[in-house]
Image (spheres, rainbow, N blue to C red):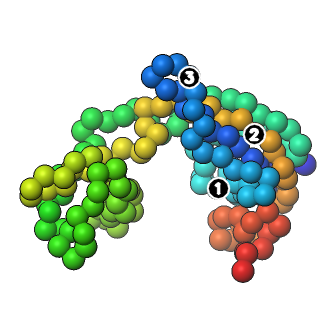
Amino acid sequence: MKINPQHVVSLTYDLYVDQEDGSEVLTESASEEQPLTFLYGAGQMLPKFEENLSTLSTGDTYDFRLSAEEAYGDYDEEAVANLPLEMFREAEVPEIGSILPLQDNNGNRFQGQVVSVATDSVIVDLNHPMAGQELHFKGNILNVRPATPEELSHGHAHGPDGHHAH
């Protein structure tokens, strides 16, 4: 079946990013046993990722690159927050490299990576971990099926076969 909006797509993928020496390293993947399953056209995926899949059908393979602009944007040197150490009184002071779940004043959730801990503050990088990087996707389309009415009303896929796992 061909990929269309309001269809559920299950696929495998290997995501590679370039290293400074020019080689590629595998950073994420989804297998046939645990595929990525999503409601196509619902805005859950990167728009350019979906655009690259738009002509494919069940059984097809794909191999494409997304520029940093098409993926998670350029690295923003300004997107760094200085959080007061008092915020962490209740919990332990986070370790450098750990990911913190954060929320802005409007209730939007996002993540930041701790880059340093000072005597009175924690410096957090708010850039997406893959900001500034070209992404290279390779994989197979395992299945394409029409979304169920329940999936359409919820705005997301309920797994490869249309049901929530219990």
- Which quadrant of the view contains residue 76? top left
Q: Residue furthest top?
A: 22
Eyeballing the image, is 131 above or below 151?
Answer: above
Relative to the observer, which residue lies in front, 114 or 109?
114
Name the residue rendered at 82%, 36% in the picture. 61
Counting labels gives 3
Question: Mark 3: which secondary structure?
Answer: loop
| Residue 18 seen in the figure | yes
Check disc 2 and report the residue beneath it: 139
The dot on residue 42 is 1
Q: Are marks 2 and 3 in contact (CB under 8 Å)?
A: no
Question: Mark 1: which secondary structure?
Answer: loop
Check disc 3 and report the residue beneath it: 23
Name the residue rendered at 79%, 69% in the picture. 162
Number of residues whose C-alpha sits closer than 10 Å to that of mark 1, classed few (under 14), some (14–19) or many (20 or more) = some
Name the residue rendered at 74%, 66% in the picture. 159
Q: Is residue 90 left or right of residue 63?
A: left
| Separation of marks 3 and 1 at Cα, in angstroms | 34 Å
Q: Position of residue 120 (x, y in %)?
A: 9, 58
Q: Amino acid at mark 1?
A: Ala
Q: Position of residue 125 (x, y in %)?
A: 30, 46
